[in-house]
Image: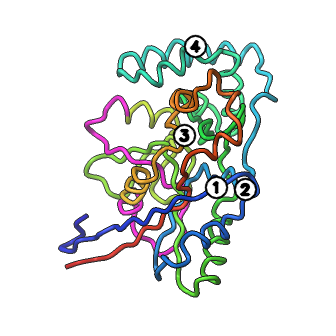
Amino acid sequence: MQERGRRVIFKVIKKPMRYWYPGANVVKEIWRTYKDTLRPGDIIALSDKALSIAYGSIYDEKLIHPDPITKFMTYIVSKIFWAKVMHYMFLEDTLSILTSTPLNVLASHKKLSIKIGGLKHFLKPLSEAGIDTTNLPYTYVSLPIQNIDKIVNELKEQLELLSSMPINILVIDSDKCFQPKGYRSIAFATRPTGIKGIIDLGAIAYFIGRRFKKYFVEYPTPVAYTGPWLGLRALLKISKIVDEKRGHGLGRNIIEVLRRLGKRSYDEVTWRDLGRVKHYPAIVVRITVKK
């Protein structure tokens, strides 16, 4: 990455960790894994989903009973509109999820999404409002952490006490955001985020970003950050590098998860299954600048 005559290098240090079950001690897990690796000013890039699960920000969608209006609207949005759009854009995996998932299950997810994110997120095809279904068992989903800024500040303070050095925290979600080409200080997200310069447009961002690809650069979404401000472009760049290095656990979507585990239905996936693969909920990024 070139910055006004300087070359900025992002070094990624990636070590496998145990799956973070609800109640996991995040500071303890990070320190145990990276205590001999951390250097002053390092960025610890955390998975938004893993953090949500560790802090118990999950919900069982089996408890939701969708009403007839929600079912009807879900059918229109998912089974008709987005199914046609996905077919047109050759997004076969997403199309398969929408067409093969029972309407009652989709409607339960939509009912939760409109409660958390409102209409602009209800209208998104998948992962609405930052709600995620992958790498969780049964009918559980992860929810965005409401007080995430407070949590990342606490993590920073505790890790700095243990390490006696400045540590920065960046939380990243694989849900996409889109930066208009030629613009460095603004981007449009498909989920809520507290990062300066990123505007949450929900389904609108998803549609324009996918439909008009040549006008946008696609990135994962940085959700929260604490540390010296690096600029939006740098945070987006780091998020993309980390997302590529992190991988997708058991899979990018429920179809990949089921194929990998040899299961027929998502509600057959257990907590034990989740510990069968390597996970990278925390990755260290080190920035160096060369002239």
**Residue flagged by tag 4: what amino acid is it?**
Ile
Query: At x 51% / y 73%, what residue is drawn?
Result: 227
Query: At x 65% / y 15%, what residue is drawn?
Result: 102
Residue position marked by numbered label 2 in the rendering: 55
Disc 3 is placed on an element classified as: loop
Query: Residue 265, relative to residue 18: is it above or below?
Result: above
The quadrant the N terminus occupies is bottom left
Image-based side of 130 in relation to 8, left or right: right
Q: Indicate which label's residue lies in the foreground, 1 or 3.
A: 3
Disc 2 is placed on an element classified as: loop
Disc 4 is placed on an element classified as: helix
For the residues labelled 2 and 3, say whether their Cβ atoms are less than 8 Å apart: no
Residue 51 is labelled as 1
Percent from the top left, x then y, of residue 291?
19, 79
Which image quadrant for residue 286? bottom left
Which image quadrant for residue 230? bottom left
Real-space CA distance between mark 2 and mark 3, rounded to the nearest whole angstrom: 20 Å
Percent from the top left, x then y, of residue 143?
67, 44
| 193 or 264, nearer to the observer | 264
Residue 250 is labelled as 3
Query: At x 63% / y 39%, what residue is drawn?
Result: 131
For the residues labelled 2 and 1, say whether their Cβ atoms are less than 8 Å apart: yes
Could you classify mark 1 by the number of other residues whose Cα lies within 10 Å: few (under 14), some (14-19), or many (20 or more)?
Answer: many
Image-based side of 24 in relation to 178, left or right: right
First in sequence: mark 1 vs mark 3: 1
First in sequence: mark 2 vs mark 3: 2
